[in-house]
Amino acid sequence: MRDGIQLARRDRAVVALVTEAFWQQGDLVALSNGMPDVPRLRLPHPVAGTGASAMAALAADLAPRLIGVLRGEASPDNPAHSPDDATDATDAPGAVGAPVEPDQAQARSEADTTLLAASDESEALELLHDLACTDGFPVIVPTRERVERLVVATGLDGSIDLGIMGPLGSATTIESVAVNAVMAGCLPDHMPIVVAGLRALLRPEFDLSEVQSTTHSVSPLVVVNGPVPAACGVASGFGALGPGHRANASIGRALRLCMINIGGARPGVSDMALLGHPGKFSMCLAEAEAESPWEPLSVAVGFEPSDSVVTVVGVEAPHSVVFVDDADDPDSAYRLLRAVAAVIATTGSNNAFFRVGSAAVLLNPEHAQVLARAGLGRREVQVELQRLATNRRGRLQSLNPMFVPRGDPDDEIHAIASPDHILVAVAGGGGLYSSVFPSWGAGAHACPILHERIETDQACELPARSSVGDAG
């Protein structure tokens, strides 16, 4: 659908072919792009993998319909819309970025801010669930007082727009971010990290509209460095991506709720992830700088040691890497590297077959020490992992021949194109297990690793330490 819209904007005659399972997503994409009348034909689902004879029959049925629509002699399968319909996508349930006032008599609009009515917080919570404004879990009701408290914590005016968030195409204002951060359970101290994370997600290179819309389970992994995460309790050790860490859970959840309520990601409508994974609720942690044998990740990529930095990359769920060190084995470090590289190149991932995209490697502190003991720094680890993460062409062709170019079956095919595309950080408790996060890599920019400085110099006194923080 997006390709059809881009061609239509160039005044090309176009008909988008959309399968039944993606028809609602096509509606949303067309409306949010202000082009609801780009003609579409509805195809059965699935099309891919149905076999040559089925594809030939579909083509024979489709060709005359397609030609007829292009010539204006036949009608497409999507109805014509009025000009006003181009804005309907922003009126969809859940497309809100405004406080809920429990004691309001009725919903109203003030200065482009929608206030929802509810008699008490219990009713407000059910209303938010009914409007699909939650991630499925209960949320903190975003009253005006609570929202204003988090807006103040950013040091920015609530009307400031961080950027347009897709696929819905809504403005990411500081107030709308604060609404979702309240719902996620954020404290004022968390807001600079949330804002920096959103700045990274909204950069064109992240391809957020595509990340939100793909059938892959890609989701932002957020790694935080510097003084700020330590000050507000972002965990880096045991279970850092699991339950029990409020800052980790709330910050990552705030980003996800923004993606739902501002970006319009709805399962089966715009977010087409076939299964998803728990990391789509929240996937945020700090690097274990004190336990790492290397300089912090943020310093390694060019920031000052005093800077606090968010690193974001779109990945799938973590894959475990088990490894037992032997200090008497001179090959121990390279055994670890081979074990990690094998998981990076796992033949179930997009990296292996499309040979693009990034991968994140979170080494537990003991595994990082094994590599450092062998004289390997972070950069050397990246270089070696890229070199070792390969599959033989014949192996890949035996699994998914459509994805693999022809060539010598014994060719070694790299899963990652460059060492720069491997994020290496230290996190978790010490022990047997580290983790690898393959990526999607199918967007225009192939899931790059992005870094964003956390702005703390523009913030006023933290509400948690002033009279502003007494609300709620």
Image (tube, rainbow, N blue to C red):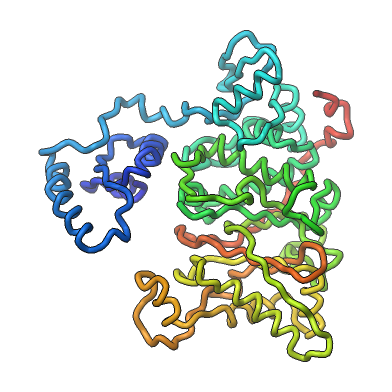
Q: Is residue 351 visible?
A: yes
Left or right, 290 with reference to 331: right
Coordinates of residue 147 in the picture (x, y in percent): 71, 28
Which residue occupies the extreme top position in the image? 105
Coordinates of residue 380 in the picture (x, y in percent): 69, 80
Q: Quadrant of the C terminus?
A: top right
What residue is at 60 percent from the left and 72 percent from the top? Answer: 343
- Front position in the image: 199 or 74: 74
What residue is at 83 percent from the left and 36 percent from the top? Answer: 462
How many numbered tags mark residues here?
A: 0
Coordinates of residue 278 in the picture (x, y in percent): 63, 49
What residue is at 71 percent from the left and 72 percent from the top? Answer: 322
- Front position in the image: 293 or 130: 130
Left or right, 44 with reference to 96: left
Give the quarter of the image for residue 396: bottom left
What residue is at 61 percent from the left and 19 percent from the top? Answer: 115
- Does residue 336 sit above or below 94 in this rendering? below
Coordinates of residue 3 in the picture (x, y in percent): 33, 51
- Does residue 108 sit above or below 94 in this rendering? above
Left or right, 49 with reference to 151: left
- Does residue 28 sit above or below 226 in this rendering? above
Give the quarter of the image for residue 418: bottom right
Q: Is residue 160 visible?
A: no
